[in-house]
């Protein structure tokens, strides 16, 4: 009995290699049936987020704010003004769901070489359909998922299809010109970190091209965009729509925050040491992310060594 079960049988624990293989393995037909039912259930909740019905019925946004986006975004999204508000909103909703499927299911398949999505990928896709992030994206008619799909698609094309690198540059430039934060993906357009000259020319050229495109509406518009960006970085909005770390801390430090009455000392501490709290929370997230990445890398290496050992 002891020989049949081995170490796993005596302890009742599944080896890390088998756990990782189960998570990353392609789905079986039964998994597809369960996933389809979960998609229908989550989709019933996600397709009518707060405010969505009003927009589809021809309603207007709750408020209008200054244009905080790069100047070229005004031109790129100008064709939406030819449509009714309801039609433009419906188009953005469809694009958001398509891009969400690309980011959570299709791109991981292409990156790993699998012909079907993994069970973990389907789990993230289904749970994401009912997530706050997707609901906020749909309710506001935002396009962050479109930019994420363009950015990840650019990285995938750059590394998997070198002949299509020019398209990767176009996709990432489009994302940067819609919002600034996709510029962080420029660091992923590197094939060999030892080739410093070529990497500098590639990334530097893309940075220069994006700076030139920021002048498409003239110098005054560019200066106004820079002023608004600096203002928003220095004074982020303290409301539920700002999901940055600093915005979250500003919100819980407010006197009218529900947390202030529950944990008054914590709110006062954050209010008096806002910058230190932001750095500490950022460091905590970075440490957690490094731990998870390290565990996944070690388990994948162990799985690879096990596969090589079984072949030899």
Image (cartoon, rainbow, N blue to C red):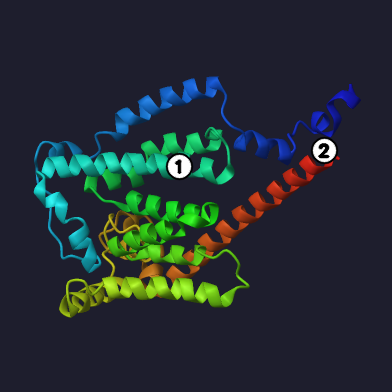
Q: Can residue 264 be seen in this view?
A: no
What secondary structure is found at the residue carrying circle 1? helix
Tally of numbered discs: 2
Left or right: residue 250 compared with residue 291: left
Of the numbered discs in the image, which one, if any, rests on residue 138?
A: none
Q: Are marks 1 and 2 in contact (CB under 8 Å)?
A: no
Occupied quadrant, residue 119: top right
Residue 70, horizontal then vertical, whole percent: 25, 67
For mark 1, does the 10 Å Cα neighbourhood hold few (<14), some (14 to 19), or many (20 or more) residues? Answer: many
Q: In which quarter of the image is the C terminus?
A: top right
For mark 2, does the 10 Å Cα neighbourhood hold few (<14), some (14 to 19), or many (20 or more) residues? Answer: few
What secondary structure is found at the residue carrying circle 2? helix
Left or right: residue 34 compared with residue 292: left
Q: Can residue 53 be seen in this view?
A: yes
Q: Residue furthest front?
A: 163
Towards the viewer: 42 or 236: 42
Towards the viewer: 197 or 255: 197
Residue 39, horizontal then vertical, whole percent: 39, 28
Left or right: residue 62 compared with residue 144: left
Q: Name the residue under label 2.
A: 311
Q: Name the residue under label 1.
A: 104
The residue that appears at 43% across and 51% down in the rendered structure is: 153
Vertical arrangement, residue 94 with respect to residue 206, above or below: above
Vertical arrangement, residue 194 with respect to residue 114, above or below: below
Q: How far apart are the alpha carbons under marks 1 and 2?
A: 32 Å
Q: Quadrant of the N terminus?
A: top right
Residue 25, horizontal then vertical, whole percent: 62, 34
Occupied quadrant, residue 90: top left
The residue that appears at 35% across and 47% down in the rendered structure is: 133
The residue that appears at 21% across and 71% down in the rendered structure is: 216
Residue 285, horizontal then vertical, whole percent: 51, 60
């Amino acid at each position: 009995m002891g020989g049949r079960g081995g170490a796993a049988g005596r302890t009742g624990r599944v080896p890390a290699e088998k756990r990782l293989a189960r998570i990353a393995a392609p789905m079986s037909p039964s998994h597809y049936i369960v996933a389809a039912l979960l998609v229908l259930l989550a989709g019933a909740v996600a397709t009518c987020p707060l405010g969505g019905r009003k927009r589809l019925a021809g309603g207007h946004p709750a408020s209008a704010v200054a244009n905080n986006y790069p100047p070229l975004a005004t031109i790129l999204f100008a064709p939406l003004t030819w449509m009714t508000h309801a039609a433009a909103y419906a188009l953005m909703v469809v694009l958001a769901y398509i891009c969400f499927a690309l980011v959570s299911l299709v791109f991981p398949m292409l990156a790993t070489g699998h012909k079907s999505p993994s069970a973990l990928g389907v789990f993230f896709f289904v749970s994401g359909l009912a997530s706050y992030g997707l609901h906020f994206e749909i309710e506001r008619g935002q396009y962050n998922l479109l930019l994420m799909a363009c950015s990840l698609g650019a990285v995938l094309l750059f590394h998997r299809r070198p002949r299509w690198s020019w398209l990767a540059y176009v996709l990432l430039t489009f994302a940067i010109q819609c919002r600034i934060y996709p510029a962080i993906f420029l660091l992923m357009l590197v094939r060999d970190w030892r080739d410093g000259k070529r990497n500098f020319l590639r990334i530097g050229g893309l940075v220069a091209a994006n700076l030139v495109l920021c002048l498409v509406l003239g110098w005054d518009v560019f200066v106004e965009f820079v002023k608004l960006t600096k203002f928003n970085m220095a004074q982020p909005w303290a409301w539920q729509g700002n999901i940055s770390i600093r915005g979250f801390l500003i919100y819980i430090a407010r006197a009218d925050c529900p947390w202030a009455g529950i944990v008054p000392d914590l709110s006062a501490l954050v209010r008096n040491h806002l910058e230190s709290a932001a750095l500490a929370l950022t460091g905590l997230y970075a440490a957690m992310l490094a731990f998870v990445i390290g565990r996944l890398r070690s388990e994948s290496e162990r799985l690879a060594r096990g596969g090589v050992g079984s072949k030899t």
